[in-house]
Structure formats: C-alpha cells, structure tokens
Image: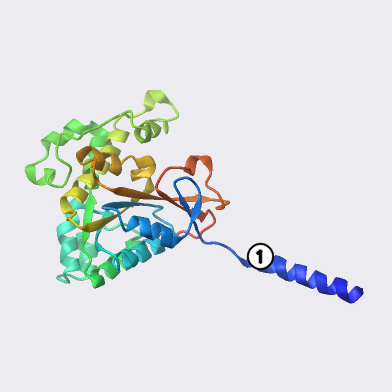
Amino acid sequence: MNRLCLLLSFICLHMTVSFSQHKAAYQLFASDSTTIDYGTMLDSLSKADIILFGELHNNPIVHWLQLELVYDLDTVAEVILGLEMIERDNNDVFQDYLRDSITHEQLDSAARLWNNYVTDYKPIIDSAKTMGIPVIGTNVPRRYASQVYAKGLTSLDTLSENEKSWIAPLPILYDKDLPAYLKMMDMFDDPAHANENLPKAQALKDATMAHFIRQEIKEGTIFLHLNGSYHSDNYEGIMWYLKQADPLLNIMTISSKEQADISLPEKENSNIADFLILIPERMIKSY
C-alpha cells in the first residue's frame, strides 16, 4: 500500500512538473475570440489583397511571426512588403540598400532608422531582400507629423511640391469622430489642455501609409504591411483610409496584444482585428 501511494505521488508530481513546464509563447484567435492555429490564419491571409500586421514594436515573438509570414506567403503568392518603420523621404536610399548599391552602414548613416532596426526589422528586410521581395517605406517623415501636431493640417499647404510627394495628397481627409482619434483626445487628463492636433498628426500618418500602399500595390500580389497595432486596430486608421479610396479591396488585419493570461482575449482585445496574437505580458522586450 505504501509503495502504491508512493507511486501515485510520483505520477502526480511528474504531471504537475510537466504541466508547469508547458509555457505557450503566444496564442492565435479569430475575430470571434475562438482559438485557431497558424495554418488556418495563413490560409485566410493568402486570399487578401492587403494585410495590415499590427505589431508591438518591442515584442520578439511578433517580429518572429512577421518573418515566418513573409516566408510562408511567398510560397503561395507574389508578396510586397511595406513598412511603417521607413519614412517616405528615406525610401530612395532604402531602395539603394535593397539593390546592394550601398552597405548597411551607409544606410544607417543616410536614413533615420529606428533604434531597434537591427534587432527587430533587419532580419525581416534582409530575408525579403534575399527572396527578391520588394520592400517599400510608407510612413510620413516624422517632422511633418510634428508640424501638424504644432500647427494643424493646414500647415502642410506651405510645403514644397517635392515635400508634398512624401505625404498623402492634400487636403488630408480627416474624421475627428473616429473612435481611435476620440480615444487619443481622452488621453489628456485635463480637457482644457487637450491638443486637438494630436489625432490629426496620427491621421496624417495613417493617410500617408494608406496612400503609398495603394500606390505600390500591384494586381495579383499580396501587400503585407507592418505597422503599430494602433494604426489598424478596430478596422480603423490605415484601413479606414484604404477603404475610403477603394471599398472593394480585400483587407485583412492582425493585431498583437499582451495579457497575463493568454487563454482568452480580454474585453478590450476582442473583435479588434481579423486575427489576434496574444503574448504573455512577461515576454522579454527588445528594448
């Protein structure tokens, strides 16, 4: 009897240890909060014209999944990769790097690369480069977003024609009542100090990225765009501008969020995208 109790105790201990060692790095969900696997998501994404991959900029799991998606989409379609992380006035020198006309060191000197470019984006870009996948910078030069924050959208009228070629065509369509932009205004503790130009600066980024996605997309391709999740969550931001220009585009969205428990999306993370990546909040950050 004692030996039986000892054996059962050992089995229970083994099961407990084994269970505690199973730590999921992420969990995928459909828009209705049902769990799905990567293959199911890939099958749906392969039918899209445009994929807006909303990321957490400092999350290594998200960047790894972006890299895998580049490889896997390339097996089923011709892919174009677009990046929020490359501003449009740096796109020409970025193309020089993709053509091997300049080195990474020269690119780093000539372009405004994000601080986490080497750890989080260079592996994706270099893989696309090796595979012959076009990579396009889509974001507005940050100085113009800062200008809008300080002076409003009408201040862009003073830009030169060359400068205007790096942003969405003027005048920028702007709906101040979109939930994402209203939420930005709620960030101010004191409404009296709320800067109504903050969501306008965000809108300039969204509109510009949407404009260059449409400009660069080609018939029969899948345009995979990497951007912060706040630029495409709740089917707003970039997607809203794309749909204003062409309602028939088949656009699919991915969002990335962190939770303590990734077994089920919390209320605020439900139905915010076609696919949701939940990552444990203790995941190590790249910065």
* Image-based side of 269 in relation to 144, left or right: right
Q: Mark 1 points at which residue?
A: 19
> Toward the viewer: 45 or 282?
45
Counting from the top left corner in percent of width and height, residue 179 is at 37, 32
Residue 34 position, x and y percent, is: 51, 50
Q: In which quarter of the image is the C terminus?
A: bottom left
Q: How many marks?
A: 1
Tell me if residue 182 comes above or below residue 51 in the rendering.
Answer: above
Q: Residue at position x 66%, y 65% from top?
A: 19
Instruction: Examine the rendered structure and indicate whether residue 272 appears above or below residue 183.
Output: below
The answer to whether one can see residue 82 in this image is no
Give the amino acid at mark 1: Phe
The residue lying furthest to the left in this view is: 161
Q: Which residue is drawn at 33% across and 32% down?
A: 178
Residue farthest toward the top in the current orientation of the protein: 192
Which residue sits at x=7%, y=43%?
161
Residue 194 position in % (x across, y down): 37, 28
Q: Which residue of the protein is positioned furthest toward the bottom in this rendering? A: 3
Label 1 CA crowd tier, 10 Å (few <14, some 14–19, many 20+) = few
Q: Is label 1 in a helix, a strand or a loop?
A: helix
Displayed quadrant of residue 20? bottom right
Left of 164 or right of it: where is 238?
Answer: right
Residue 55's spot in the image, x, y percent?
A: 38, 53
Query: Do we see residue 48 in this rendering?
Result: yes
Q: Quadrant of the N terminus?
A: bottom right
